[in-house]
Amino acid sequence: MARPDRFEKEESDFIEKLVHINRVAKVVKGGRRFGFAALMVVGDGKGRVGFGHGKAREVPEAIRKATDAAKKSMIRVPLREGRTLHHDNEGRHGAGKVLLRSAPEGTGIIAGGPMRAVFEALGVQDVVAKSTGSSNPYNMVRATFDAIAKQVSPRQVAARRGLKVSEIVSRRADGGSEE
């Protein structure tokens, strides 16, 4: 009886998204041996997200391995108002390139499949994203992580420059022009 409660608790802690399953075959003397590779994205919906890759002979085992790997590789991403990115960004991995843009409230997640899973797990509600180059889910997820890892909040910029947060935010409202 204790096991279902434990699984329900796990589900409430993290949002788990299955991005891709790949079936591979190894040809042996008696025929083909099938294996599965899973790509999972895990997040808490509040600014932490990670991705993982798992391989096994059975799909559930591959998903479990990928989920464990994703939980180990989680990163924290600063979000503006808890719903969008602070600034536009580009990311790349291999031939996969992504462009992420912050969006006004009510826009929703406008992004392709693998990127959408990352944003849903991250807790972003408004973002516009475009992928160019490779449409391979692994490259798209890694390129998206490259872009979101570059996100910096006004608080981090202010600390680095030795300024107040209000000075950084007021410049953004002015359009970045100094007199």
Image: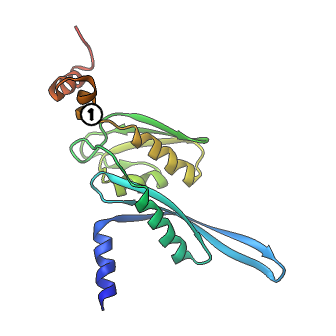
SS at mark 1 in the image: helix
- How far from the left and from the top, in percent, is residue 44? 31, 59
In the rendered image, the vertical position of residue 127 relative to residue 27, given as above or below: above
Q: How many marks?
A: 1
Q: Is residue 106 visible?
A: yes
Q: Nearer the viewer, residue 81 or 30?
A: 30
The answer to whether residue 24 is left or right of residue 172 is: right
| Relative image position of residue 17 (x, y in whole percent) | 42, 64
- Amino acid type, mark 1: Gln
Extreme right residue here? 29
Kindly identify the residue that appears in the image at 22 percent across and 23 percent down.
Answer: 162
Residue placed at 80% from the left, 80% from the top? 31
Q: Quadrant of the C terminus?
A: top left
Query: What kind of colouring is applied to the model shown?
Result: rainbow
The residue lying furthest to the top in this view is 179
Number of residues whose C-alpha sits closer than 10 Å to that of mark 1, classed few (under 14), some (14–19) or many (20 or more): few
Task: Kindly identify which residue carries mark 1.
Answer: 156
Left or right: where 34 falls relative to 131: right
In the image, residue 74 sits, relative to residue 60, either above or below, namely above
Q: Is residue 41 visible?
A: no
- Position of the N terminus, as image quadrant, is bottom left
* Residue at 42% over, 42% down: 129
* As drawn, 38 above or below 163: below
Q: Decide if residue 174 is on the left or right side of residue 123.
A: left
Q: Quadrant of residue 147?
A: top left
Instruction: Give percent across and percent down for residue 23.
Output: 64, 69
